Image (spheres, rainbow, N blue to C red):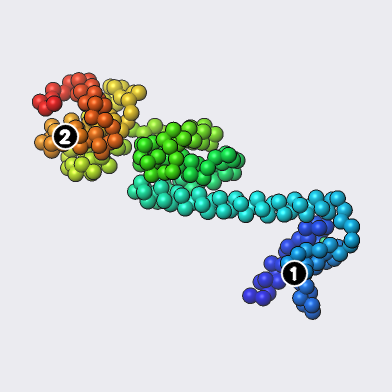
Amino acid sequence: MAAGREKAERTESCPYCGKGLLLRSPATGTISCNVCGAYFDKGILYRNSPEPSGTELYRLRKWQQRIRVENAAERNLAFALSELDRLTVANNLPRTVKETGAKIYRKAVSRNLVRGRSVESIGAAAIYSACRICGVPRTIDEIADTSRISKKELGKTYRYLSKNLKLNLMPAKPQDYVQRYGTKLKLSEKTKLAAIKLLDEASEKELLSGLGPSGISAAAIYIAANLNGEHKSQSQVSQVADISEVTLRCRYKKLADALGITLTFQ
Ligand SMILES: [Zn+2]
């Protein structure tokens, strides 16, 4: 233990002269520089000569500033990681999303993109992006609801990050939402598969472009559930997807029309 500590002290270079090392004298226990003789007394580093030169003062200030910046960055990152943890739990996300979010956050820090922005907004945008990258999409509303920032700020920060970090984001597909929405509605696997089939068919015919993926997913689920005799109301389905009933009606009628499905329910 003692040897390890001495070794650590020996590698500390003198902030005054920049050439010497700060060493502890085994006889007196004082720590001093082996080149310029600067020494510690009650935790304060003193120069040994009376007049510090401009260069020495400059070097000392730079050193103190660097230590301050490093400490602040470490505190900021620790806070950010706890925010990512919190968002992961609140949105019931797998660990890979949290890890990807942390990578994005660190990248943003190293590119100096966090300056002037809150940890909460960069953290939420990192998680939102990570969801997309990992193929477990959450809507911007869902992430905003569990974060401490508005949907508008989240959208802005997300666009800023994805542009500056060149995040390679696949747009979320409506098929990606079926499993989660279907499970929330307690639908059978057969019905979920039927909904995915409807969406596959629609995307082959390029009917889905420009429509919000969560809404179109809800529409396919609504149709598939009712065709399979697992009746779900428009209110139940629209709530799960967090869209209005009007939007759901509009989407499912459009989808049914486009696929040539005749609905016996309204
Ligand atoms: Zn020195």
Circle 2 sits on which residue? 233
Q: How many other residues sit within 10 Å of disc 2, few (<14), some (14-19) or many (≥20)?
A: some
- Picture coordinates of residue 149 (x, y %)? 44, 40
The mark that comes first in sequence, 1 or 2, is 1
Q: Is residue 170 above or below residue 90?
A: above
Three-letter amino acid code of the residue under disc 1:
Lys
Left or right of 209 in this view: 155: right
User: What is the secondary structure assignment of the residue under circle 1?
Assistant: loop
Q: Quadrant of ligand 1?
A: bottom right
Q: In this rendering, would 51 be left or right of 69?
A: right
Amino acid under disc 2: Ser
Mark 2 secondary-structure assignment: loop
Asked if residue 30 is positioned above or below residue 16 in the image, the reply reads below
Look at the image and tell me in which quarter the N terminus lies: bottom right
Question: Is 139 or 197 nearer to us in this picture?
Answer: 139
Q: Is mark 2 within 8 Å of ligand 1?
A: no
Quarter where residue 194 is shown: top left
Instruction: Establish if 102 lies above or below 40.
Output: above
Identity of the residue drawn at 19% across and 32% down: 234
Q: Residue placed at 72% from the left, 54% from the top?
A: 64
- Check disc 1 and report the residue beneath it: 42
**Which quadrant holds the C terminus?**
top left
Q: Is residue 27 visible?
A: yes
